[in-house]
Image (cartoon, rainbow, N blue to C red):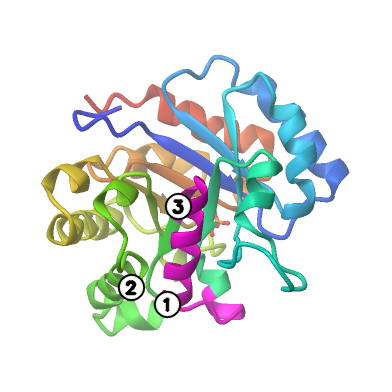
Amino acid sequence: MNQFSRRIFVAGNWKMLTTPAEAAALVKALKVKVVNIHQTEMAVCPPFTNLSIVAELLKGTAIKLGAQNLFWEEEGAYTGEISAKMLLGAGCEYVIIGHSERRQYFGETDATVNRRLKRALAAGLLPIVCVGETLAQRQAGETEKVVETQVRGAFAEISPADFAKVVIAYEPVWAIGTGVNATPEQAQEVHAFIRRLLENLYNRELSAGCRIQYGGSVKPANAAELMRQPDVDGALVGGASLQAESFAAIIKTAEDLDKG
Ligand code: 13P
């Protein structure tokens, strides 16, 4: 928690990994390791097929459940898609929207991010909206321009009351799964930029209250220096969330931070 009541939030994105049996084993191992975590908010985001089994195992723990995507229509003939109501029914509180892998491989655009975001909010799911530049964009000096376009696109027509429920994840594409994390300075710079932009789009209070996670090669060894940055309010963890040991270590690091 910091002076703006931004509770540190560490979430694990399991991506397209884990069978039901593997997911059960992972969450069983994780929950015993985090029984003493009280300040830090925790969530895991398994694949759709493992949501129900993980929800069952998370009962009575402080670990929350999230999904990795949703479709924007309420229901109907959309073969292969998953609705907000299905996610809520499976026990989800959170949903990741606009992950760069969805933008890269599945045609996600700022406009479809916006549609998914509207549906999530209307249904009562808490969105984690991902933004971030590619290596080429960073090298071309376009980081702020790209992130600004993504943020403006995602939050078009989103009311202040709805915006207050949103978590943002800054995930530089070049840092995802590469082992090369953004330096704490690079992360802080973009997080502060996003916060200034949010102040423009909404107001000072909503901007100061919005949690912005960092994602991209977060591991126990770099978690403290990243999450210690004033505008970094936690982490969205991929690879290191697939092992109970390393994910719990990142959570403990968050819990031990004193961000006054
Ligand atoms: P890695 O932690 O594996 O780099 O993945 C980050 C990510 O994409 C989380 O959504």
Looking at the picture, which amino acid does disc 2 mark? Gly
Q: Which residues are magenta?
A: 103-128
Looking at the picture, which amino acid does disc 1 mark? Ala
> Is residue 114 shown in magenta?
yes
* Residue 122: mark: none
Query: Which is nearer the N-term, disc 3 or disc 1?
Result: 1
Q: Which residue is mark 3?
A: 121
Picture residue at 28% right of the left edge, 85% below the top: 140
Task: Tell me the CA gap for discs 3 and 1.
Answer: 16 Å
* Residue 153: mark: 2
Q: Secondary structure at mark 1?
A: helix
Query: Which is nearer the N-term, disc 2 or disc 1?
Result: 1
- Count of numbered circles in the view: 3
Q: Which residue is mark 1?
A: 111
Picture residue at 64% right of the left edge, 51% below the top: 85
Describe residue 36's horizontal placement relative to residue 223 as left or right.
right
Relative height, residue 140 to residue 121 (above, below): below
